[in-house]
């Protein structure tokens, strides 16, 4: 055999008890598991004191351009992530035409940068997946990636940025775009229902698209219409919509944020339990932190975003319209801020695209406003205009008791929701998976190690319908991580968010070391993981 991992404590992803064994790898797959030991190979790795687990699956990632920009990609590889699910929140870069490509690049600059360093030589989902396969100089990418068709981008392509119902012809085109993306290998469809233009879709339209997704065995992954005021109603809406469409549902970053939802996680879990008992196919993902992360422009009311990025900037330049925007955000509670009046002391600027604006980073909007002797809205408006909507934010509105309650649920999986751009990104981008293992397993005992590993491996693999990933079983792909259960921890903090984790010395993708002795190798073993036909 090419490789034998000797004497590891195997946590196989099933949730069952761990056991000590030798594990043999050949041709990118696990070919032998010997509990009595004694396997031999051309290379033998002594894993005494280490846990061997399936590679972690990040069910909510924003590495759509990072995978093509950064061959190292240690932000994820060093965490033990061997597969990321991208195309999230209804906005990504395929399918597009020349017009919508430029629009979506501007709309999510705060997530991924504008992409001046990327050769956008694709337009369809299949072409984008092919580009991931070839990666850097035809060798591939750092870790594997699966893709969700972004419903907001599909609507942008078929309807535009108008707040109106789609015509029958436009709906037919959206159906075909989704079907084409599924045929080309997407695993499902995402939505960003607090982001334009996806939020303009009514339930009937979303239901029709979900029916297409279901025909191909995919799942629907909505960032639903509210995580604040009306959060429970928004969750219920998604449950009912997918039940009507007979489509599997995966709730993205399933949090209960803002003051109105403090202590209300049990109500969400009761809603899900009732639906599951009635036969619904539901999973969810969360990140193990309280603050959220998005862009500053996302906080605006939806009517201010109609027409796309240039229309937003024009409204912000007009004093009268800008005052209307302020009133909705500060008094009414804009839908972009989940129906809750914005609290500027919770909005921390985490990144800007214009280096001249770097003084805003790491400070809340209120702190910057106080230092400048002006109102928070004046500061926010100027930043939006000068940075051309590219500023990213941390939003400090979460509740620890909700985080812990939701992560314990039996359909929970792990997702970083990590935005990798900006001078001060959310530490979840670099720390989600070791933070689960170190803080919530070892330090707090929120759940046991075997159970936690199942949340991060086999459960997401089952949702993605990947029959040969997510478990340490013979015949499965050798996407593996070895970590020290006594020392594994997230190095990233809010003060130093790009610090790599500790206690994860080895990570393999397709049987090849991408992390060896705690250091990133030059291996590019990642590929696009396409939907398994049903």
Image: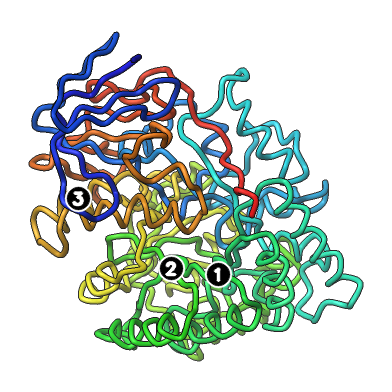
From the image, tell me which residue sits under label 1: 248
Nearer the observer: mark 3 or 1; the answer is: 1
Q: Residues within 10 Å of mark 1 (few under 14, many from 20)?
A: many
Residue at the image point whose x is 39% and y is 66% from the top: 365
**x then y, percent, for residue 415:** 39, 56
Disc nearer the start of the sequence (3/1): 1
Quadrant (top left, top right, bottom left, bottom right) of the C terminus: bottom right
Disc nearer the start of the sequence (3/2): 2
- Position of residue 327 relative to residue 428, above or below, is below
Residue at the image point whose x is 47% and y is 51% from the top: 61
Q: From mark 3 to mark 2, how far is it between C-alphas?
A: 20 Å
Please say if the residues under marks 2 and 1 sit with CB atoms less than 8 Å apart.
yes
Q: Nearer the viewer, residue 295 or 195?
A: 195
Q: From mark 2 to mark 1, how far is it between C-alphas?
A: 8 Å
Q: From mark 3 to mark 1, how far is it between C-alphas?
A: 28 Å
Residue 283 badge: 2
With 164 as the anchor, is 329 left or right in this view? left
Label total for image: 3
Q: Secondary structure at mark 1?
A: strand
With 285 as the anchor, is 354 left or right in this view? right
From the image, tell me which residue sits under label 3: 437
């Amino acid at each position: 055999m090419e490789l034998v991992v000797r004497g590891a404590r195997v946590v196989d992803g099933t949730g069952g008890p761990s056991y000590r064994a030798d594990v043999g790898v050949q041709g990118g797959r696990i070919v032998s598991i010997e509990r009595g030991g004694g396997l031999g190979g051309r290379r033998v790795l002594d894993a005494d004191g280490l846990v061997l687990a399936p590679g972690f699956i990040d069910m909510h990632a924003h590495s759509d351009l990072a995978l093509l920009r950064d061959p190292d990609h240690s932000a994820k590889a060093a965490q033990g992530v061997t597969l990321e699910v991208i195309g999230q929140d209804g906005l990504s870069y395929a399918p597009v035409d020349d017009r919508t490509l430029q629009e979506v690049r501007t709309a999510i600059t705060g997530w991924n940068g504008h992409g001046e360093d990327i050769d956008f030589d694709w337009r369809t989902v299949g072409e984008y997946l092919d580009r991931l396969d070839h990666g850097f100089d035809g060798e591939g990418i750092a870790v594997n990636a699966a893709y969700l068709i972004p419903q907001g981008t599909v609507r942008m392509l078929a309807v535009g940025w108008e707040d109106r119902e789609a015509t029958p012809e436009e709906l037919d085109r959206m159906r075909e775009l989704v079907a084409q993306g599924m045929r080309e290998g997407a695993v499902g469809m995402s939505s960003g229902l607090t982001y334009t233009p996806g939020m303009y879709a009514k339930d009937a339209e979303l239901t029709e698209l979900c029916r297409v997704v279901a025909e191909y065995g995919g799942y629907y992954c909505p960032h639903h219409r509210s995580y604040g005021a009306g959060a429970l109603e928004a969750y219920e809406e998604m449950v009912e919509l997918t039940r009507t469409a007979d489509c599997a549902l995966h709730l993205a970053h399933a949090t209960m944020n803002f003051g109105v939802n403090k202590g209300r996680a049990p109500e969400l879990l009761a809603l899900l339990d009732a639906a599951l008992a009635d036969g619904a196919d539901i999973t969810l993902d969360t990140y193990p932190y309280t603050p959220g992360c998005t862009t500053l422009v996302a906080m605006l009311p939806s009517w201010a975003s109609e027409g796309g990025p240039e229309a937003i900037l024009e409204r912000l330049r007009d004093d009268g319209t800008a005052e209307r925007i302020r009133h909705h955000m500060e008094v009414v509670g804009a839908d972009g801020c989940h129906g809750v009046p914005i609290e500027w002391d919770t909005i921390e600027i985490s990144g800007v695209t214009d280096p001249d604006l770097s003084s805003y980073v790491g400070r809340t909007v209120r702190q910057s406003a106080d230092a400048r002797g002006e109102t928070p809205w004046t500061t926010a408006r100027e930043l939006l205009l000068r940075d051309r909507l590219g500023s990213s934010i941390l939003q400090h509105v979460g509740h620890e008791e909700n985080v812990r309650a939701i992560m314990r649920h039996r359909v929970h999986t792990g997702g970083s929701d990590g935005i990798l751009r900006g001078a001060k990104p959310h530490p979840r981008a670099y720390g989600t998976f070791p933070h689960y293992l170190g803080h919530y397993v070892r330090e707090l005992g929120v759940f046991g190690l075997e159970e936690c590993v199942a949340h991060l491996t086999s459960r997401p693999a089952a949702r993605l319908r990947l029959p040969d990933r997510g478990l340490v079983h013979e015949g499965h792909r050798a996407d593996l991580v070895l970590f020290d259960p006594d020392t594994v921890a997230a190095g990233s903090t809010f003060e130093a968010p790009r610090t790599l984790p500790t206690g994860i010395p080895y990570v393999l993708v397709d049987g090849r070391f991408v992390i060896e002795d705690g250091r990133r190798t030059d291996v590019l073993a990642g590929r696009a993981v396409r939907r398994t036909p049903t």
